[in-house]
Image (tube, grey):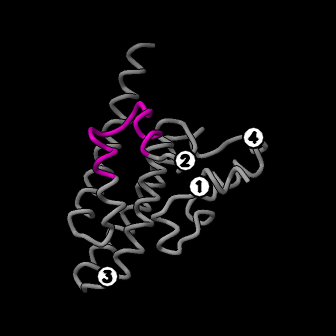
Amino acid sequence: MKQNNELQHPIFDKNGLNTKDLFPDEYNYLSRGNSINVYPWDNEEQSLKQLVNSWEELKVEIENGFHERKRDVIQTKMVEACSLYIKLLFWSNKKPVSLINLNDKLKNLTIKPINVVDRLTFILENPFLYPSFLQLSELFIEQQKAYYRNKIMSNKKE
C-alpha cells in the first residue's frame, strides 16, 4: 500500500513508534485521497502554531529527561519531537510529509534552514544525545524564521 511506503522511516520503526499515530493527517490523506477538504498543510500558519506549541511542551519533557538521565524517555520523546519538526518542515512548504527518500525530499523543499539534511540526519541517528536536542531546538527556531521571512517576501511581491 502507498501509505506504508510514504510513512516508513528506520528511526520510527527502530523505536517501535507507529507512524500512523505520529503522522495521522498524512495517513488519512494517503488512505483516503483528497476526500477531506482542508489538511494542515493547506492551512499552514494555524497548523505551524499548533506544532510549535506541541514542541514547547515536549521540549520541557526532554529537558527533564536529560536532567534525570532517563535515556529511554529521552530517545522516545526526541523521536516524537523529530516527527513534529518533519511536519513543520513539510507543512510550512504546503506539502504533506513523505518519509520515503526523506533526504531527497528535504533537498527539494523551498523553505528550510541551511544544512537541514545533514543536521536532521545527525539528530535522527543520535536522538539520545544532548547536542541532538540542542540542534533540534535550533532547527525549530530557524524553520519558523524561514517560513515568516518567505511569507513577508511573498507578500511584498504581490
Mark 2 vs mark 1, CA separation in Å: 8 Å
| Kind of residue sitting beneath label 3 | Arg
Residue on which disc 4 sits: 34
Q: Start and end of the magenta stretch?
A: 103-120
Query: What kind of element bears circle 4?
Result: loop
Under circle 2, the secondary element is loop
Disc number placed over residue 97 in the picture, else none: 2
Q: Residue beneath label 3, please?
A: 71
Q: Residue furthest top?
A: 158
- The tag earlier along the polypeptide, 2 or 4, is 4
The amino acid on which the numbered mark 1 sits, given as a three-letter code, is Leu
Q: Tell me whether circle 2 and circle 1 mark residues in contact (CB < 8 Å).
A: yes
Q: CA distance from mark 3 to mark 2?
A: 27 Å
Q: Earlier in the sequence, mark 2 or mark 1?
A: 1
According to the picture, the residue beneath numbered tag 1 turns out to be: 7
* Amino acid carrying mark 2 in the image: Val
Q: Quadrant of residue 55?
A: bottom left
Residue 14 lies, with reference to residue 37, above or below; the image says below
- Residue 113, x across and y down, in percent: 30, 40
- Pick the quarter of the image with the C terminus: top left
In three-dimensional space, the C-alpha distance between marks 2 and 4, rounded to whole angstroms, equals 15 Å
Please, what is the three-letter code of the amino acid marked with disc 4? Answer: Asn
In terms of secondary structure, where does tag 3 sit? helix
Instruction: Measure how far apart labels 4 and 3 are at the Cα level.
Output: 40 Å
Residue drawn at (37%, 74%) of the image: 75
Work out whether 45 lies above or below 72. Answer: above
Residue 91 lies, in percent from the top left, at 51, 43
29 with respect to 138 (left or right): right
